[in-house]
Image (tube, rainbow, N blue to C red):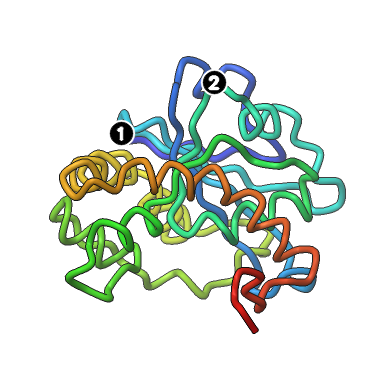
């Protein structure tokens, strides 16, 4: 397994033949509009990870933006709602098509309320992810080896998690419902950005 660090953008030839790419991001916090996007990490599921340390003065990353919007490439997230909103705010792209393992987990794994990435990955793949670097300074000029390892770990196993969840969704007859949720997810993220982050517009009251 190799982790490739890129500054500013993803190389044009990176992940060029992938039909699905696992994606995650690191930010300076979890509040939309306040906390900047710092890092985007990606993997095609073949054992390597690409970590892009963004230029926050311009967010000029055409290759990354092209991949995020490529209709032939499914972007796999865990809680994609936040990442997709961040990508719209800072990269000005609507990420699609997408798959969210957290949504899939909530639809398939109704026997538990533990749908965090660490719990889902541990149960479905046997991999125990470390979250030690989750709250570190992702805006630092240089990323540490521990930060790079953490960033990579969040995408390296998403393809395997997706495969297991797909089996469960089909078994429970909820695969079509999951697909509809994934199609709506970019719109849910845009609602968050527009100010409806804490409002359920489908609720009666």
Secondary element under disc 2, as helix, strand or loop, is: loop
Indicate the quadrant containing the C terminus: top left, top right, bottom left or bottom right. Answer: bottom right
Q: Position of residue 168 (x, y in %)?
A: 19, 48
Relative to 54, is 28 above or below?
below
Question: Looking at the image, is mark 2 or mark 1 nearer the viewer?
Answer: 2
Q: Position of residue 34 (x, y in %)?
A: 78, 73
- Give the quarter of the image for residue 164: top left
User: 10 Å neighbourhood of mark 2: few (<14), some, or many (≥20)?
Assistant: few
Relative to 33, is 76 above or below?
above
Name the residue: 50% across, 23% down.
15
Residue beneath disc 1: 47
Query: In this rendering, would 58 be left or right of 17?
Result: right
Query: In this rendering, would 126 be left or right of 96?
Result: left
Name the residue: 80% across, 64% down.
194
Q: Seen from this angle, which residue lies furthest right?
A: 58
Closest to the observer, 12 or 114: 114
Q: Position of residue 112 (x, y in %)?
A: 21, 73
Name the residue: 51% across, 51% down.
24
Query: In this rendering, would 190 be left or right of 23?
Result: right
- Between the residue at mark 2 and the residue at mark 1, the CA separation in whole angstroms equals 21 Å
Residue beneath disc 2: 72
Dot placed on the residue nearer the N-terminal end, 2 or 1: 1
- Give the quarter of the image for residue 159: top left
Secondary element under disc 1, as helix, strand or loop, is: loop
Q: Position of residue 79 (x, y in %)?
A: 48, 59
């Amino acid at each position: 397994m190799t982790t490739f660090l890129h500054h500013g953008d993803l190389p044009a030839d990176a992940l060029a033949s992938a039909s699905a790419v696992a994606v995650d991001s690191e930010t300076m916090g979890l509040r939309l509009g306040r906390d900047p996007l710092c890092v985007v990490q990606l993997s095609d599921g073949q054992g390597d990870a690409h970590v892009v340390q963004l230029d926050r003065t311009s967010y000029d990353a055409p290759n990354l933006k092209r991949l995020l919007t490529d209709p032939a490439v499914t972007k796999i997230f865990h809680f994609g709602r936040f990442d997709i909103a961040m990508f719209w705010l800072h990269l000005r792209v609507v990420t699609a098509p997408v798959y969210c393992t957290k949504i899939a987990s909530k639809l398939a794994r109704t026997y538990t309320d533990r749908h965090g990435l660490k719990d889902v990955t541990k149960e479905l793949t046997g991999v125990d992810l470390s979250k030690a670097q989750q709250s570190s300074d992702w805006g630092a000029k240089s990323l540490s080896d521990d930060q790079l390892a953490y960033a990579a770990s969040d995408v390296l196993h998403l393809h395997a998690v997706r495969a297991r969840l797909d089996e469960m969704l089909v078994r429970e007859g909820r695969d079509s419902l999951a697909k509809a949720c994934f199609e709506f997810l970019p719109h849910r993220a845009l609602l968050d950005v527009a100010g409806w982050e804490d409002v359920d517009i489908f609720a009666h009251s």
